[in-house]
Each structure stands twice: as C-alpha cells, then as structure tokens.
C-alpha cells in the first residue's frame, strides 16, 4: 500500500469554475485562496515571491526550471514571501548555484507558502489568458486527501482584488531610513555615503531594489507608511517624493493616497511613481484605473517611449492599468505597452512629475529603464 500512496497527487489547484489541477505539493502544508496570475520571467522566482505587489495572488511560472538556483537572503525584496503560493511545471531540483543558502522547497515551507509542481502550466496559462485571472484554492496534503468540492467552494468565495486595499497590509509599520545601493560585484551591497537629494518614499509595498536604485542615484531616502499624510511628508522637507509599487486595487488605496499626493503636488515638488505609485498619481491627477483581463507579469515586456521612439524591454507586474483616455489636460502619456497598447507612463507638462507602469529597478529583469531614477535625481538638482 505504501507504494500506491506515493503515486497519489499531494497537491490540488481548484479554480472557481470547477477545473481541477493535481500535482506534487512542496513548501507548506494546508490550503490558501487567491487570484491566479502567470509570470513569464526566466529568472528571479525568489524576487517575485517576495514582491509585495503579489499580495493576494498565486503565481504560475511559465518557465519550467524554477528552484534550480535555490534561494539566498540577498535576493529577498521584502522580509517574507508575499505571494500566496506558486504553481510550477517541474518539481524543483537541488540547487546548483554558489550563492544558494537553502532549497526553494525548504524556504517555502519555513515561511508558510504552498506550492504545486507537475502541472501543465501551458494549459493553465492559456486558461488565464482566455478567461481572465481566475480565483483559486491551492491545497497541499502529503497524504493526498482532498475535498475538491470544498476547495472549489473556497475559490468561489474568494472576494477578489477589485476594491481591495492591500497596500495597508504590506506597508511598513513605521518610517525608516534607507542607504543601501544596488548589488555590484565583488562587494555586494554598499552604503550610499554621498547623497545629494533628500527623498521621501511612500511605501505601498516597496521592493528593496527600488530603494537601492534611489540610493544609487544619489538619494538620501526616508520611507514612510502608505497612510502618511501630506503634512507627514512635507514635515521632512524633502527635495522630491517617490511613490512605490504595491498590490491591490489602486482605487481602494487611493482613498487615502490621493489626498496626500494632491497636497504634495500643490507644493510643486518633483515626484516619481512606479507601478501602483503610477496609478495613484494618475488618480490624483484626475485619471481613472481599470482592472485588466490577466494583467502583465514578466521580465520581457516591450514598452515604447513615445517621446524618443526608443523601445525598452522591461519588467512588469500589474493587474490594473491607467486608462489613457481619461488623462486630463496638462498630463501626457509618455510610454505604451507594445503588447496591447495599454498605458505605461505619464508626465505633467508643466512640472517635474512623472511615473511609469513598469519596473525600472528590474529585479528580476532587464535594466533598460534605470535612467528614470537618474531623471528623477536630475529633476531635484534643479
């Protein structure tokens, strides 16, 4: 009998429409509910799992070799994984990388995150593209006992990300200073000791590498929680304000973020936003955001800079987008996705206020867009 039980699936992914995927579970035992998205990046699964923008989501990796470089403390984008779980095609192998300190499966188990391997991720990705990001329940049981009807019911009961203010869940509890710069061989991370610009960064779910990029561009960074008011920001007398990435519905987070941004805009300070920060800025300027069918999640997305004609290959992670048709007078579209024409950037025409939908800090992904951090620094230099 022992041999028979070994062949039983030890994980089950249940979609709200009743579709079931079985596979081999790893990581934590138990079950979780979330929205399911897919990510096409070929590297950086650890950065993706620890990216706060993935709160409330299970990530399907379209690239099959997940886990083969293990994990290490340097690559965390925040202290703990934020994505609810992962779906992969092949079971993770033992890691083969000089930086690895732990296996992916052990890391996931210690941090309470569930994963399923052995899934036909191509079929699953096609389903997400055709039907939109589904609500799912993901369960891992080493004995292979699943109440599939209950799992489907849990998936159906998931509230979804529309209307959810998840930034409040992942933001920092209190303000802090940041001075670590980007990773460089052979020193690794070094401190910024010659900062020229005082920046307040609003943490809607900020990735560490964004803060490192700001430091590398010459910024002395103070991070404030998502719920900071305009008064909190201006009391620090910054040269510029940065709006970070983050999860959830921008319209829900905008309830408290928009008044803060509007108050800072009135002072004429340079401002730069990324991802959710881009969407927050758009809302503060009077534009609208919309939920996308399956979003953009990957490290190979072509984005065109309308003003220069240059095409950048970028890192993307968003399920909502700014409606470019809703941009008011005095605000121009600067970047568009060459996949679907959706908005990927804006700027005010009369002051140094701009934002992008993609992730110029990469991590994982290409670094074509790092110049945006330098542009922000230049705007503060006057």
Image (tube, grey):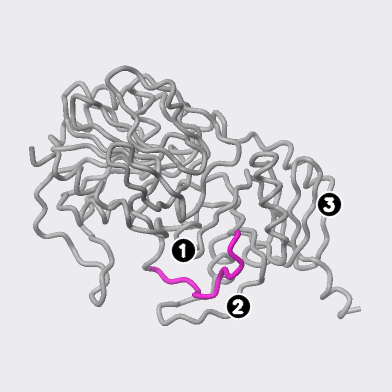
**Is residue 290 rendered to the left or right of residue 261?**
right
How many numbered circles are shown? 3
**Is residue 363 rendered to the left or right of residue 350?**
right
x then y, percent, for residue 25: 70, 65
Is label 3 in a helix, a strand or a loop? Answer: loop
Tell me the number on the disc at residue 44.
1
Mark 3 burial class by Cα count in 10 Å: few <14, some 14-19, many 20+:
few
187 versus 222 height, above or below: below
Q: CA distance from mark 3 to mark 2?
A: 29 Å
Q: Residue at x 25, y 67 (%)?
A: 189
x then y, percent, for residue 134: 68, 41
Query: Reading the chain from its start, which is encountered first: label 2 or label 1?
Result: 1
Residue mark closest to the camera, 3 vs 2: 2
Instruction: Name the quadrant of the N terminus.
Output: bottom right
Pointers 3 and 1 in contact (C-beta within 8 Å): no
Closest to the observer, 141 or 156:
156
Q: CA distance from mark 3 to mark 1?
A: 33 Å
Q: Is residue 72 magenta?
A: yes
Tell me the number on the disc at residue 307.
none
Dominant SS type (magenta): loop
Q: Residue at x 42, y 60 (%)?
A: 364
Outermost residue to the right:
1
Q: Is residue 260 magenta?
A: no
Q: Which residues are magenta?
A: 62-73
Q: Quadrant of residue 121?
A: bottom right
> What residue did someone put label 2 on?
93
Tell me the number on the disc at residue 147.
3
Pointers 3 and 2 in contact (C-beta within 8 Å): no
x then y, percent, for residue 263: 24, 22
x then y, percent, for residue 276: 41, 38
Is label 1 in a helix, a strand or a loop? Answer: loop
């Amino acid at each position: 009998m022992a041999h028979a039980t070994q062949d039983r699936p030890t994980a089950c992914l249940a979609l709200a429409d009743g579709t079931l995927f079985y596979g081999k579970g790893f990581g934590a035992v138990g079950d979780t509910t979330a929205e399911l998205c897919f990510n096409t990046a070929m590297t950086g699964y650890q950065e993706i799992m620890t990216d706060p923008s993935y709160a409330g989501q299970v990530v399907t990796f379209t690239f099959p070799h997940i886990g083969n470089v293990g994990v290490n403390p340097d690559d965390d984008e925040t202290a703990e994984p934020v994505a609810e779980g992962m779906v992969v095609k092949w079971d993770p192998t033992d890691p083969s990388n000089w930086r690895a300190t732990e296996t992916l499966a052990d890391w996931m188990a210690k941090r309470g995150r569930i994963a399923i391997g052995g899934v036909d991720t191509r079929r699953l990705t096609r389903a997400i593209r055709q039907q939109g990001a589904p609500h799912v329940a993901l369960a891992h049981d080493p004995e292979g006992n699943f109440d599939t009807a209950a799992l489907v019911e849990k998936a159906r009961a998931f509230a979804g990300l529309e209307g959810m203010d998840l930034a409040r869940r992942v933001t920092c509890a209190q303000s802090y200073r940041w001075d670590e710069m980007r990773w460089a061989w052979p020193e690794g991370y070094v401190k910024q000791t010659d900062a020229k610009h005082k920046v307040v960064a609003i943490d809607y779910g900020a990735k560490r590498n964004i803060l490192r990029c700001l430091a590398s561009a010459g910024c002395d960074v103070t991070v404030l929680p998502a719920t900071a008011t305009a008064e909190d920001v201006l009391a620090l007398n910054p040269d510029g304000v940065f709006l970070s990435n983050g999860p959830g519905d921008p319209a829900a987070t905008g309830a408290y973020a928009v008044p803060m941004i509007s108050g800072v805009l009135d002072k004429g300070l340079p401002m730069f936003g990324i991802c959710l920060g881009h969407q927050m800025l758009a809302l503060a300027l009077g534009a609208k955001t919309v939920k996308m069918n399956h979003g953009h999640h990957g490290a190979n997305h072509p984005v065109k800079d309308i003003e220069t004609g240059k095409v950048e290959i970028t890192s993307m992670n968003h399920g909502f987008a700014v409606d470019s048709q809703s941009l008011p007078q005095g605000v121009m579209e600067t970047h568009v996705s060459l996949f679907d024409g959706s908005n990927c950037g804006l700027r005010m025409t009369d002051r140094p206020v701009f934002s992008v939908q993609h992730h110029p800090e990469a991590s994982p992904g290409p670094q074509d867009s790092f110049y945006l951090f330098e542009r922000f620094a230049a705007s503060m230099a006057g």
